[in-house]
Amino acid sequence: MKHMSLRWAWRSVVMTAFVAGVAIAPMPMRAASQAKAPVYLISYSQTHTTFVRNFNPFQPAAYLDFTQGAIYEPLAIVTTAGTGHTYPWLATSWAWSNGNKTLTFTIRPNVKWSDGLPLTAADVAFSYNYGKTHPAADLTGLWGTKQLTSVRVVGTNQVALTFSAVNTTVLATAASNIAIIPQHIWSNIADPATYDNQDPIGSGPFTQVISFSPQEFILGKNPYYWQPLSYDGIKVPAISSNDQALAAMVSHQLDWTADYIPGIQKSYVAKDPTHFHYFTAYNNPTIGLFFNDSVYPYSLVAFRQAVSEGIDRTKVAGIGEAGNVPPADALGVSLAWPSWADPSLNAQVQTLSTFNLATARATLKSAGFTWDGSNNLIDPKGNKVSFVLETPAGWSDWILSYQIMAQTLNQLGMNVTVKQVDQNGFFADRSAGTIPGAWLFTEQSGTTPYQMFEYSISAESYFPTGQDAIAKGSWNQERFSGPDATAASGLLAQFRSTADQATQVKLAYQLEKIWINDLPVVNLFGQPWWYTYSTDHFTGFPNASNNYAIGSTYHYPDNVKVLTTIKPV
């Protein structure tokens, strides 16, 4: 501990040089009498070539740069990590009333914003109601789905949320998906979708923008934070690829990441088994291939079925993801919630999940697709089929997985190409549904498959192409709509109205039948929470023996629990 300041000062110099690609020689030790250097956690959430100074919690990728977590916080943290945990946060408690239609939160006393003003129940009510008047700020999606009817201050320190109907599933969404914002700042912001919020005021642990450049920024300690903090902030370097991240990790220049690392035991852990660790959890829905289901010919169920039959999931998971994930079936329920999968659908699920080009061709032919003399697939309207698989540049596992999928789909004549784009552009395109063809991403998680269906196939979760679905609280990136989406909405309403699991399972079976008949998303493989950490400089990260939160740096609100739990060595 005596030379902590010298070590941290040296790490700062090395990190700056590393990001800039400059080789430097060790500097001589400085006198111990010099001022103590700040202790920064060095971490990043996802790859960035450069940073743009924007700490708006309502931007599509706010969870990827610690805006959500370090700067803005929820009322409670409800996580599926381990066997599930619920942590009171800006709210100390909550209770149901009004026939289980009103949820009342008691707000933590003596919490201040980072400018020193008190955080009050009025701020909390404002944060919810701001999403009603500004759909881009409806992070819970409860206004967009018409589940919330009112949010109001009760007494001096409580906020009551009233719902249109009983909802036994809503606590995690209502308490955890929200980012509480200060009324005295955001009441003056006319359009939260475009405000860049360069100097944020939040309640989180690290709110102060100490420095900012396109290659690195530092978030310093909130001087008024309501919990004790044992270190000074977060240093976030711009890491452009998984390979660059690994180089920084093995050089002891990254403390915490959410990276996919091929052969992680050999390429990372073995470099310093005492300090280098990883932990992967699978309590999630699957990763799938999303088309815009409102655009022809992706709107044809037979097309999506043929794509499912034309992908070798075992090869994608085994080679593209280096065997670090299990292949999923087309339904996508069995990995995360095996007891909720309808056994009567097994044969249909098996056919759609099995790689068989002959079956895929037959599926296409029966729907009116043909092939020209060069084996180009021609849709029923006479157009040649082609589409783009878009991925953030540097995501090496996704790139390889795309290439594997493109290889077999091109054997069906689909003319698939893989395109790498800037990460910010990818997330914006994904949220708006404007990616040319199809892409991989995730559905929301939960202790039951309810959220997977609510966010993906409910009529209430549908937003037209061009609107930011995720900013509106929806993960219906495939733009699934129509009579079956309306039917799914009714089943989900019944699911919310009961706490009886046997009834919920029966309703889930009906939702699964809609899913497998329409195949809105082509599920591919299990979604892990990639996560590495070094105990070189910090301890207390989640692991197999203490799985208190999801460890991926980008996972909000779990990341604020990790940030406030870890401590410097």
Image (cartoon, rainbow, N blue to C red):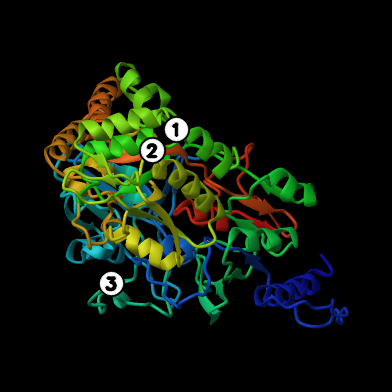
The type of residue carrying mark 2 is: Asn
Identify the residue at horizontal 56%, vertical 47% (top origin).
530
Identify the residue at horizontal 44%, vertical 54% (top origin).
556
Residue 523, disc: 2
Identify the residue at horizontal 18%, vertical 47% (top origin).
460
| Secondary structure state at the residue bearing disc 1 | loop
Residue on which disc 1 sits:
328
Quarter placement of the N terminus: bottom right
- Mark 1: give few (<14), some (14-19) or many (20+) Cα within 10 Å: many
The type of residue carrying mark 3 is: Pro
Instruction: Examine the rendering and report whether any part of residue 196 can be seen.
Output: yes
Give the image location of residue 315, x and y in percent: 53, 36
The answer to which of 12 and 183 lies nearer the viewer is 12
Position of 88 with respect to 270 (left or right) is: left
Give the image location of residue 237, x and y in percent: 60, 70
Give the image location of residue 403, x and y in percent: 49, 49
The type of residue carrying mark 1 is: Ala
Q: Relative to residue 86, is residue 259 depicted above or below?
A: below
Q: Quadrant of residue 42?
A: bottom right
| Secondary structure state at the residue bearing disc 3 | loop
Q: Relative to residue 309, is residue 391 depicted above or below?
A: below
Q: CA distance from mark 3 to mark 2?
A: 33 Å
Instruction: Examine the rendering and report whether any part of residue 147 can be seen.
Output: no
Position of 222 with respect to 357 (left or right) is: right
| Secondary structure state at the residue bearing disc 2 | strand
- Mark 2: give few (<14), some (14-19) or many (20+) Cα within 10 Å: many
Give the image location of residue 103, x and y in percent: 25, 46
The answer to which of 421 and 279 lies nearer the viewer is 421
The mark that comes first in sequence, 3 or 2, is 3
Question: Does the residue at mark 3 contact the one at mark 2 (Cβ under 8 Å)?
Answer: no
Residue on which disc 3 sits:
192
